[in-house]
Image (cartoon, rainbow, N blue to C red):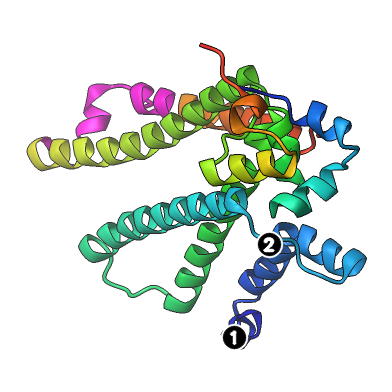
């Protein structure tokens, strides 16, 4: 798989694939070195894998739908398909890897309080991203409508220098996205390295 | 959910690794089971109970 990706010149995906496989399969590699046999794939591992596949698939479907809509409606130039698919594959793989690590270690490593906090931070991250995308869309839509009815110079006629509402939303959503992302990562990493006896 | 796996394991002088091998699971699964952090299937609960020569009811304690 990695070789195929290298021939397609999507080196970053190939590297991510190899690193991801090593991270996920470190127990298998370690078991092969120590005991010369693979560890069993029990029901917990199977459950974790199927949940992670589901999450990766949902992410890929959502990302594809999100990309297809603007490309089919607004953009006339076709994108570099190989790199676009490479990027999608890479991000889907990252979602799979993070999901697997979450179900395998973080969920069991963190206490109830930690999980609640992680859920809150993730919610803040998701809402900020959605608010940013929606505000960009609303900004363009409202300006389009106003230009259509009042002419291209309508904003300069209002006498205001800046666009306070959208500027505030954009700034706020970027700050809250950063806070949510950093918070989530800190708790995730803490759960990942919580030692089990 | 609380489990008495650790207690039974000590009684029969079994390591987590040995019990995992007997029940056909990974050592991590035994760790999570001992801590009550993993809800096993009926088959796995039965396998662990059989490996520890006891019953599922004796091994897994559910609090109302």
- Name the chain under label 2: A
Gap between marks 2 and 1 measured at Cα: 16 Å
Residue name at image x 81 percent, y 70 percent: A37
Q: Is residue A171 visible?
A: no
- Output the chain of dot 1: A
Judge from the rendering whether residue A139 lies leftward or rightward of residue B27; answer left or right: left
Q: Quadrant of residue A160?
A: top left
The quarter of the picture where the N terminus of chain A appears is bottom right
Element carrying mark 2: helix
Assign the magenta stretch its main secondary structure: helix
Q: Position of residue A121 (x, y in %)?
A: 55, 26
Residue contact at pointers 2 and 1, CB within 8 angstroms:
no
Tell me the tag on residue A20. 2
Q: Position of residue A97 (x, y in %)?
A: 61, 54
Q: From which residue to which does the magenta span run?
A: A150-170
Residue B35 appears in which quarter of the rendering? top right
Residue drawn at x 28%, y 58% as measured from the top left: A70
User: Where A191 sits versus A20, above or below?
Assistant: above
Question: Residue A148: x percent and y percent?
Answer: 10, 42
Magenta segment: does it hold A4? no
Indicate which disc, 2 or 1, sits on the residue closer to the N terminus: 1
Residue farthest toward the bottom in the current orientation of the protein: A7
Residue that badge 1 annotates: A4
Determine the residue positioned at 39% across, 52% down.
A58
């Amino acid at each position: 798989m990695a070789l195929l990706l290298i021939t397609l010149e999507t080196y970053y995906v190939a590297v991510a694939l190899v690193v991801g496989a090593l991270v996920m399969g470190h127990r298998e590699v370690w078991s092969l070195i120590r005991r010369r046999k693979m560890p069993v794939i029990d029901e917990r591992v199977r459950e974790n894998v199927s949940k992670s596949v589901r999450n990766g698939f949902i992410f890929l479907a959502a990302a594809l739908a999100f990309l297809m809509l603007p490309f089919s409606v607004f953009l006339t130039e076709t994108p570099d398909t190989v790199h676009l698919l490479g990027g999608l594959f890479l991000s889907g793989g990252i979602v799979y890897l993070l999901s697997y690590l979450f179900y395998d270690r973080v969920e069991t490593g963190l206490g109830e309080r930690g999980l609640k906090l992680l859920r809150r931070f993730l919610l803040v991250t998701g809402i900020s991203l959605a608010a940013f995308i929606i505000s960009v869309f609303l900004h363009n839509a409202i300006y389009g409508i106003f230009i259509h009815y009042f002419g291209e110079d309508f904003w300069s006629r209002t006498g205001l220098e800046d666009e306070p509402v959208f500027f505030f939303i954009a700034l706020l959503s970027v700050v809250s996205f950063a806070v949510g992302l950093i918070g989530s990562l800190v708790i995730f990493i803490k759960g990942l390295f919580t030692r089990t006896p | 959910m609380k489990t008495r796996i650790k207690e039974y394991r000590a009684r029969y002088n079994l390591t987590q690794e040995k019990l995992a091998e007997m029940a056909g699971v990974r050592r991590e699964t035994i760790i999570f089971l001992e801590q009550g952090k993993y809800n096993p299937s009926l088959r796995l609960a039965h396998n662990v109970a059989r490996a520890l020569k006891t019953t599922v009811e004796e091994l897994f304690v559910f609090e109302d």
